[in-house]
Image (cartoon, grey):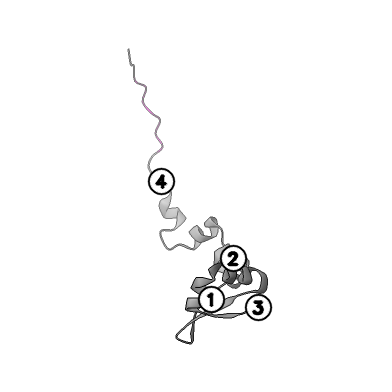
Amino acid sequence: MKVTWQLQEAKNRFSEVVDTALKKGPQTITRHGRPTVVVLSVEDYARMNPQSQRSILDWLRDCPGPELADLIDDRPKDKVRDIDLE
């Protein structure tokens, strides 16, 4: 099977391009004879891009921003006053 497709041919046979990427690996699409994009399976992409496998918790830990200690509410913890509603 092909590994390189001209853009027009890839557009006309997109399902075949996708099926080939799933079965045989990444498929390169060219425009004006120059490689432009690659179609690949999600599994191949995940292997190549470890960032895509990060959990939301890991992502949040790496976000810039205030330290956890700055987010802790340090207001006095006084008891709530009793209110007579009758």
Main SS of residues in magenta: loop
Q: Is residue 13 magenta?
A: no
Task: Using the image, determine if residue 76 lies above or below residue 70.
Answer: above
Q: Which mark is residue 1?
A: 3
Q: Which residue is mark 2?
A: 42
Q: Residues within 10 Å of mark 4 (few under 14, many from 20)?
A: few
Which residue appears at 59% of the width and 70% of the height? 16
The residue lying at 61 percent from left, 71 percent from top is 21
Query: Could you tell whether 9 is left or right of 78 in the image?
Result: right
Image position, residue 55 (x, y; %)? 56, 58
Circle 4 SS class: loop
Near-viewer residue (59 or 4): 4
Residue at mark 4 to residue at mark 3: CA–CA distance: 62 Å
Kindly identify the amino acid type of the residue bearing the numbered disc 4: Asp
How far separated are the C-alphas under marks 1 and 4? 49 Å
Distance of mark 3 from mark 1, alpha carbons?
15 Å
